[in-house]
Every structure is written in C-alpha cells, then in structure tokens.
Amino acid sequence: MASIEKLPMLAEGYERLTADLKALREERPRIVDAIEEARAHGDLSENAEYHAAKERQGQVEATIADLEDKISRAQIIDPATLSGDKIIFGATVTLLDDDDKPVKYQIVGPYEADAKAGRISYNSPLGKALIGRKVDDEVEVTVPSGDKFFVVEKIEFI
C-alpha cells in the first residue's frame, strides 16, 4: 500500500522524476511492439525474446507506478523562500570536519541525494544529525567508516 505522507523535494528533483516518467511512458509502445513481434515467432515457452520483453514490460510498469506515487506526494520546496537560523530541508550547510576542512552539503529528499554532488538526504545519518542544528553546534554522526565529528560553520538558503 502506498504511503500518503508528503515527499519534500526540490524543483530539480521533481523535474527529474517527471522526465523519467515521461521517458518510461514513451517506451511502453515499443515494448508492446517487441512482445507482438516475439509472439509472431511461434512457441512462447522457448521464446527468449518474448520472455525478455515481458520482463521489461513488468519492470517499466512497476517503475511507472512508483514514479507516479512519488510525484503525487511531492511537496516542492524552494530553498530561496526559506530562512532561519536552524538547519532544515533545503538548507545548504558548510561544516568543518575533524581537520577544520570545510565541507558543504545541501539537505534534500532521498530521491535527489548525491553525496558526491554535495546533496545529502534529510533521512541519511548525517542529514538526521544536522536537522535542527545551528551555527557553531557540534555534530557527531556514526557512519559505516566510524564516528565523524563536525562543527556547523554556516547555514544558507540558496
């Protein structure tokens, strides 16, 4: 059963989901054509093309349903309209690590997260540890590589 809770996300994440949905919907007729072509080859019990096309159809339909659910529950948040002195969804945070090296992250939704691009999910271990913190707060987070310590240096809404 699908959840009815809202999914906070940035406009870019919403656009990416809708683009993925559009591409999958456009793939549907090609899959149907592949199934029909494979069906024309005769015996379906030993027809690898038919089974591959049916499997792809199942994957596409499941992904479409998942994307439609996420899009229907999307709550688009524009960080530029936010303000405050606490870390919340959409905030861009500059942290100082153990070596006083700055690291910068934006708090985003789980479907937009990409740590290499500086985007972490609000429900990741670090995201959870940061929500509600203020400048100069110390943050300790346990990650697979061990405990990490950070100090919040700056909070921006950009």
Image (cartoon, rainbow, N blue to C red):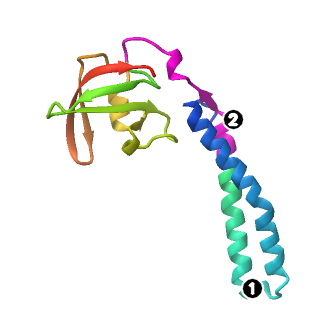
Between 59 and 101, the one lying in front of the other is 101
Image quarter of the C terminus: top left
Between 20 and 139, the one lying in front of the other is 20
- Mark 1 Cα-neighbour bin, 10 Å: few <14, some 14–19, many ≥20: few
Residue extending furthest left? Answer: 99
Q: Which residue is mark 2?
A: 72
Question: Is disc 2 in contact with disc 1, using a CB cutoff of under 8 Å?
Answer: no
Please state the horizontal and vertical placement of residue 129, each as a whole percent of the image.
Answer: 32, 29
- Mark 2 Cα-neighbour bin, 10 Å: few <14, some 14–19, many ≥20: few
Please state the horizontal and vertical placement of residue 87, each as a whole percent of the image.
Answer: 38, 20
Determine whether 109 is above or below 62 in the image: above
Regarding residue 2, the answer to whether it shows in the image is no
Determine whether 77 is above or below 34 in the image: above
Residue extending furthest top? Answer: 84
Q: Quadrant of residue 56?
A: bottom right
Please state the horizontal and vertical placement of residue 99, each as a whole percent of the image.
Answer: 14, 34
Q: Which residue is mark 1?
A: 45
Q: Nearer the viewer, mark 2 or mark 1?
A: 2
